[in-house]
Image (cartoon, rainbow, N blue to C red):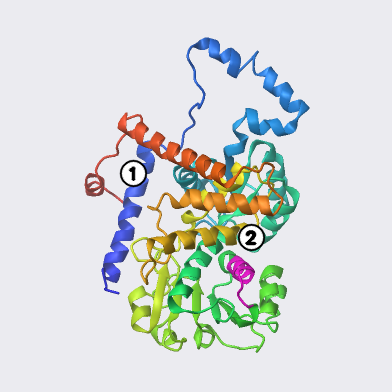
């Protein structure tokens, strides 16, 4: 892999977006608006859409609650809910400061999945209050996307919400990351000729992402006894009583017990020795993982260094140290492990069957659909997973998630594969066409050129 940019150049590139973002956010005064989807031919139409006509669908829903999906847009509403306690790499910055992120998530939902998503940042501290809130908003939404909630309460909220609510509840930092990581790993293993059941996997970082990745990898056939998980204090094991005593984190403790049967001690260096796969979701590098540690890995090693903005190790350094396939979380390097490949299509699918939940098995099904799409295009060391430009992958993911919902008995309706495909393609393509028309008609204004903005930028 060629060194396309120096470290300083990469940092300057990241700073460029940071300089542009405040101006463009203020230019548009936010990123979302609501517009009607029904025809308004004249004022008489409000007698249909509002009183007195609206009473008729209200009465129908009162008699048969399931008709809310027929007479309202609930079938396509998703709430993007966050308390702002762990926003991107910024930490606990609060709900207001997290709102730009949730708006951004909502536009990705719409553009790539055709989903009408709404940002909902809340001033809620304890997890039980968050659960009460989720239960209270359930009647409006077909699904809920939890976002940027600190651990360990994010584990509890997801686990309990999936029990209490009868709509899909998803935590993208957990399930979304796990889905795309598995998709990338499936194709990487094909290229190196290894089986997921046989390999040694090292997970660096023991936060929301890697704990759920461990769940999903095991579901996909990985052997927990061949896994090691490393946090800031070292390798997890059943000897690590601090996980329960200091962190009060039973989800992490469960994996401390399931992994590392040999009770290996040490840190990242010791864990990586002989590993076939390293999946890092930890702190930014570039020296969190060192080249000499990669050299101790097994032949044809796979390294996913996914910290942002700087991966735990530069991809060219990992390659020079002997890694066969390298992925990161960045779009300017090959093999971007990006959540946006997963959640728009998965929600499209579960919404289209009016699912009562979203399961880890649906993550596996979606990951396989992502992997198959890339394989059909032709996988190689620099293309193991689709990119966000492969828009037609999203209907594939939607169909996979929908069919898995039907298989698991949690779908309220059961369209055929062809019906699901046609519906997903239409809804997603219509969303993209709408955006194009709004821009061409200048109802969405073009922003000033980037260089013009940067020339007047004042930090």
Side of 137 where 202 appears, left or right: left
Secondary structure, mark 2, is: helix
Residue under label 2, please give it. Answer: 361
Mark nearer the N terminus (2 vs 1):
1
Residue 298 lies in the magenta-colored region:
no
Secondary structure, mark 1, is: helix
Residue 218 lies in the magenta-colored region:
yes
Residue at image location 69% in from the left, 18% down from the top:
56
Distance in Å between CA atoms under marks 2 and 1: 42 Å
Q: How crowded is mark 2: few (under 14 residues within 10 Å), some or many (20 or more)?
A: some
Residue at image location 33% in from the left, 82% down from the top:
320
Badge number at residue 23: 1
Answer whether labels 2 and 1 touch (C-beta < 8 Å).
Answer: no
Q: Farthest residue toward the right?
A: 63
Q: Is residue 35 above or below residue 9?
A: above
Position in image of residue 452 (x %, y %): 22, 44
Residue at image location 69% in from the left, 37% down from the top:
139
Residue at image location 24% in from the left, 43% down from the top:
449
Position in image of residue 236 (x %, y %): 63, 80
- Characterize the magenta stretch by its predominant secondary structure: helix
Q: Which stretch appears magenta? A: 211-223
Taking the image as drawn, is residue 11 in sight?
yes
Q: Which image quadrant for residue 118? A: top right
């Amino acid at each position: 892999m060629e060194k396309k940019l120096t470290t300083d150049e990469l940092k300057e590139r990241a700073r460029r977006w940071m300089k542009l973002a405040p101006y463009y956010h203020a230019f548009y005064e936010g990123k979302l608006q609501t517009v009607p989807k029904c025809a308004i031919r004249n004022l008489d139409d409000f007698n249909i859409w509002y009183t007195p006509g609206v009473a008729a669908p209200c009465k129908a829903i009162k008699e048969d609650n399931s008709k809310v999906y027929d007479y309202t847009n609930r079938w396509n509403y998703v709430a993007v809910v966050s308390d702002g306690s762990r926003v991107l790499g910024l930490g606990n910055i609060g709900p207001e400061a997290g709102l730009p992120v949730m708006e951004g998530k909502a536009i990705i939902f719409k553009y790539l999945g055709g989903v009408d998503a709404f940002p909902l940042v809340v001033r809620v501290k304890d997890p039980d209050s968050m659960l009460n809130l989720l239960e209270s908003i359930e009647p409006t939404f077909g699904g809920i996307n939890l976002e940027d909630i600190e651990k360990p309460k994010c584990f509890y909220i997801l686990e309990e919400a999936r029990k209490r609510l009868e709509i899909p509840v998803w935590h993208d930092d957990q399930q979304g990351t796990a889905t795309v990581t598995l998709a990338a790993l499936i194709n990487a293993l094909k290229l190196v000729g290894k089986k997921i059941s046989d390999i040694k996997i090292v997970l660096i970082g023991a936060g929301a992402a890697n704990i759920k990745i461990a769940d999903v990898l095991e579901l996909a056939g990985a052997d927990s006894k061949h896994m090691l998980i490393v946090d800031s204090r070292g390798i997890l094991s059943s000897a690590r009583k601090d996980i329960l005593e200091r962190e009060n984190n039973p989800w992490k403790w469960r994996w401390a017990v399931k992994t590392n049967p040999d009770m290996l001690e040490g840190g990242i260096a010791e864990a990586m020795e002989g590993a076939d796969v390293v999946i890092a979701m930890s702190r930014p590098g570039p020296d969190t993982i060192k080249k000499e540690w990669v050299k101790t890995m097994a032949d044809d090693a796979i390294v996913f260094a996914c910290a942002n903005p700087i991966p735990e190790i530069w991809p060219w350094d990992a390659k020079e140290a002997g890694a066969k396939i390298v992925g990161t979380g960045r779009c300017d390097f090959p093999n971007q492990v990006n959540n946006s490949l997963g959640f728009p299509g998965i929600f499209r699918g579960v919404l289209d069957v009016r699912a009562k939940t979203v399961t880890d098995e649906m993550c596996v099904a979606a990951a396989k659909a992502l992997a198959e799409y890339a394989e059909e295009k032709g996988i190689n060391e620099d293309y193991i997973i689709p990119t966000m430009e492969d828009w037609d992958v999203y209907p594939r993911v939607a169909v996979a998630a929908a069919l898995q919902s039907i298989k698991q008995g949690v779908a309220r309706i059961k369209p055929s594969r062809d019906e699901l495909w046609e519906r997903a393609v239409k809804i997603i393509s219509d969303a993209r066409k709408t955006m194009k028309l709004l821009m061409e008609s200048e109802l969405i204004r073009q922003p000033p050129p980037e260089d013009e903005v940067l020339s007047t930028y004042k930090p």
